[in-house]
Image: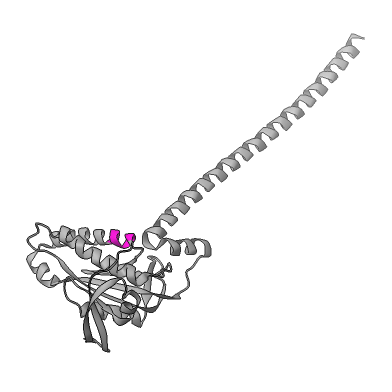
Amino acid sequence: MKTQAIERIVASFEVMQSSTDSLSSDFLDALARLEDTAIQKRLLQELIEKYVELEKRVDGLLRNTLPESVAEEIKFNGNYPARTFDGTIFFSDCAGFTRLAEKMSSELLIQRLHILFSGIDKIMVRYGGTKIKTIGDSYMAVFGAPLTLTDHATRSVEAALDIIEYLKEFNSGQPLPIEMRFGIHSGSFMGGVVGRDRMQFDIFGDSVNIASRFESAGEKGRVNISEDTYRLISQNFEFEGRGEISLKNKSPMKAYFVTGRTQKVG
């Protein structure tokens, strides 16, 4: 009798142990799955954080090299197709730059240009202009692209006149003052993004070439504008007619010097 009772107890214990082992195994499997899920969630969160950080960096790079509206279009559409604009192109350069370069150390000259162009950048922002590029001592900008401005011509001339005023302060106390000349022309042109590794918004067309020629045919401290620009701003400024002037690789064109404001905008 005792033997049979003991055998039943042992059998019951073995069943209990088998059941416990099964429960333990199921519990451990559940824990493993839970751990895998936690790891996956953590990895997913890390990937999301890295993506957000990368997106911020890309967004910052785009906005540092491109106008905001262009950067936004590239961000959402993946590209920025070239298109036609109506606007005003602005060119300026430092008159007598070669002489300055001969008399001023390279370090000082670069420092002075940096300060000068930083000041011009602020003026461009004030009037809604878009800086295109600087090449050596030349500064190129556009009004009316990539964002439309109905008063692009007025804004461009206002900016030029403000730069002339800014130069007075900039040159105060300097033994070698920097003087600039300005060329402005209004018309149609193409605008788009060039470059792949280093994208840049740029403009192209005959109107751009004409504006550059007007700058070359200008005089230091004066704003030289084309007749197309003159027609758009004749009520806002005072002028000195120059008649027709010769332009490199172009037929002679009427030109005007802006001598002052009749009313101020911006």
User: Which quadrant is home to the N terminus?
Assistant: top right
Residue name at image x 30 percent, y 64 percent: 264
- As drawn, 16 above or below 208: above
Quarter of the figure with residue 32: top right
Residue furthest to the top in view is 2
Q: Which of 158/234 is in front?
A: 234
Q: Is residue 123 magenta?
A: yes
Quarter of the figure with residue 145: bottom left
- As drawn, 138 above or below 188: above
| Residue 221 percent across, percent down from the top left | 17, 70
Residue furthest to the right in view is 1
Q: Is residue 246 magenta?
A: no
Q: Is residue 113 visible?
A: no
| Residue 25 percent across, percent down from the top left | 72, 31
| Residue 111 percent across, percent down from the top left | 17, 58
Q: Which of 137/157 is in front?
A: 157
Magenta stretch: dominant secondary structure: helix
